Amino acid sequence: MTRWYEDIHSGQKLSLGDHTFTLEEIVKYNLQYDNQYFHTDPELAKHSHFGGIIASGWHTALIGQRKLVDGLFAEEARLKALGEEPGLSGPSPGINKMSFVTPVKPGDTISFELSVTDKRPSKSLPGWGLLFNNMKAVNQRGELVYSADYVAFSKLRDFKPTLKQRIGIWMARAFSG
Amino acid sequence: MNNPITKDYAHFEDLEIGQTIDLGATTLTKEMIITFATEFDPFPFHIDEKAAKASLLGGIAASGWQTGAIALKKLLENFPKKLASAGGLGFTNLKWKRPVMANDTIGGTVTIANKRRTKSRPQWGIVTLEFDITNQKSQTVMTMSLENLVDVRNPEITDEGSPK
């Protein structure tokens, strides 16, 4: 959430804007990554229970990830403009659960929102905290498209490593090539 | 089911618990990593060499989302017969355990861990697919579990795959 771990609290929300899926981008993604008839061919897709072509769930989540990264950069710029110092986001260790509820059809406009549900200091990575975030994607009719529970690393501002931790960090750096 | 497209595809009844699908091998070049991340996951540590070196990952590493996209692509390509899928319900326990660095080769297996039917949707069964994605050193880089709906060939027969 582009703030220091200490400044992030459960319940904080970040609106990530929306994206309108075109037939062209749906077909392009699916021909490369999810080549099934209801994802690639509008005519054949009519035979499926979806009644027409739909986006791949993974593609929908990828667009959500893009909106998330753009949203974090925009928030960082906003904080800097206010004279505040943004924090540092790290890589993600995983996703606890991601559920696809309503399919995305060409022309659908999906809005994305991230909210913080919990946080705790990382046990494996001194100086970093773990954030638990929920991503929600909703279509133009207000129907839930997908919901995902993300885990993400966030850097601690006030971290003072113990001597043992300092030696650990130094050794990790020295031996990581 | 009278779907002319999927009539010869593998149906729920054709799948066996314990069956594994090998995903083959895919090498991720730096160019592939940067192209994908620029479109979908443009964190500096995925697309900028200098930022990547200074990050926790220590060099250009693939977006975990790309590893997942490739795993799903490879599952479709390597399934012995096309699957009469009725769509994915979602993923659980998705873990990015190790970074995939430029020029790493990823592969691994998908195992059919479970299959079950529900009373509410007799036309479909739910199949649980466990992904174990590994690198060229046989280290696991990503795991996830996918629940997918698969067409049942004979919905009127209810003793198949322990219905509830």
Image: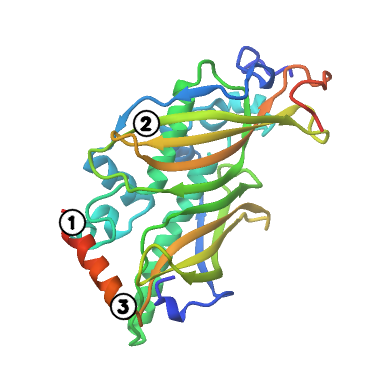
Mark toward the viewer: 1 or 2: 1
Q: In the image, what residue occupies the spot 82% across and 22% down?
A: B158
Helix, strand or loop for disc 3: loop
Residue at mark 3: A162
Q: In the image, what residue occupies the spot 41% across and 73% down?
A: A75
Front-most of A152 and A2? A152
Left or right? Give the position of A89 relative to B16: left
Is there a contact, CB below 8 Å, between mark 1 and mark 2? no
Q: Quick check: B13 above or below A146? A: above
Left or right? Give the position of A134 relative to B78: right
Pointer 3 or 1: first along the chain: 3
Helix, strand or loop for disc 2: strand
Neighbor class of circle 1 (other Cα within 10 Å; few <14, some 14-19, many 20+) is: few
Q: Chain of mark 1?
A: A
Residue type at mark 2 is Gly
Q: In the image, what residue occupies the spot 48% across and 43% down?
A: A59
Q: Chain of mark 2?
A: B
Quarter of the rendering containing residue A134: bottom right
State whether residue A49 appears in this view.
Answer: yes
Mark toward the viewer: 2 or 3: 3
Q: Quick check: B114 above or below A170? A: above
Quarter of the rendering containing residue A115: bottom right
Q: Quick check: A170 above or below B69? A: below
Residue A92 placement (x, y as % from top left):
41, 57
Q: In the image, what residue occupies the spot 62% across and 20% down?
A: B16
Residue type at mark 1 is Phe
> If the image is split into quadrants, where does the N terminus of chain B sit?
top right
